């Protein structure tokens, strides 16, 4: 398996209202020294990229509808133009598939499929990051509890020793 440099990727999101956001590999990394801050920002980051995914899905669905409508329109035009001629369904489909407007729309749809998949991966990455943050925070709390228990035992032992020395 090839090593992937997570630092080297960057995704730029432009929303319909002109807002832009960039995501790099560093944004997904967890800084164990700053868990509380990262835990507090995580819901907003997840919500943002979940919204981006939904916007990508909506745009893809719109272009799918546009492609279906274009197919129907072209099909009807070809049937009208070839009335009285023997044109098979395969020939009609071939004419539609090679129509420049149809191929352009189909290519846009393929690009939108890619964008939607990438948005889903980013959304899932933030979901995974949340799980990691929760686990890390839980482990840190357990470690702090253990440290406090040890310090409390040490303090009790020290008090016992002082009492024994005094008596």
Image (spheres, rainbow, N blue to C red):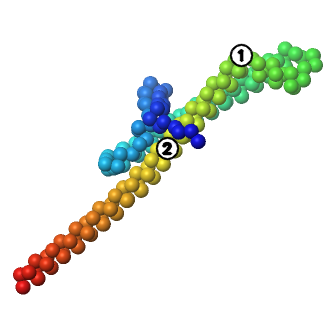
Gap between marks 2 and 1 measured at Cα? 37 Å
N-term mark: 2 or 1: 1
Q: Closest to the observer: 56 or 123? A: 123
Residue name at image x 13 percent, y 78 percent:
161
Q: Nearer the viewer, residue 43 or 28?
A: 28
For mark 1, give the secondary structure: helix
* Relative to 144, 132 lies left or right: right
Which type of secondary structure does the marked residue at label 2 adopt?
Answer: helix
Q: Position of residue 147 (x, y in %)?
A: 27, 64
Q: Quadrant of the C terminus?
A: bottom left
Position in image of residue 58 (x %, y %): 58, 34
Q: Quadrant of residue 159?
A: bottom left
- Give the camera-side residue of 144 and 81: 144
Q: Which mark is residue 100?
A: 1
Q: Nearer the viewer, residue 36 or 154?
A: 154
Q: Which mark is residue 125?
A: 2
Residue pictured at 87% horizontal, 16% vertical = 82
């Amino acid at each position: 398996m090839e090593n992937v440099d997570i630092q080297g990727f960057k995704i730029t999101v432009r929303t319909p209202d002109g807002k832009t956001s960039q995501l790099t590999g560093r944004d997904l990394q967890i800084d164990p020294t700053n868990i509380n801050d990262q835990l507090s920002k995580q819901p907003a980051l997840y919500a943002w990229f979940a919204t981006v995914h939904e916007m990508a899905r909506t745009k893809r669905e719109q272009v799918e509808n546009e492609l279906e409508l274009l197919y129907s329109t072209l099909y009807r035009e070809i049937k009208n133009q070839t009335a009285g001629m023997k044109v098979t369904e395969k020939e009609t489909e071939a004419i539609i598939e090679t129509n420049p407007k149809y191929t352009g729309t189909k290519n846009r749809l393929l690009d939108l499929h890619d964008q939607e998949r990438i948005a889903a991966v980013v959304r899932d990455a933030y979901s995974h990051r949340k799980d990691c943050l929760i686990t890390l925070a839980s482990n840190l709390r357990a470690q702090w509890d253990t440290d406090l228990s040890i310090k409390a035992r040490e303090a009790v032992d020290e008090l016992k020793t002082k009492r024994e020395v005094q008596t």
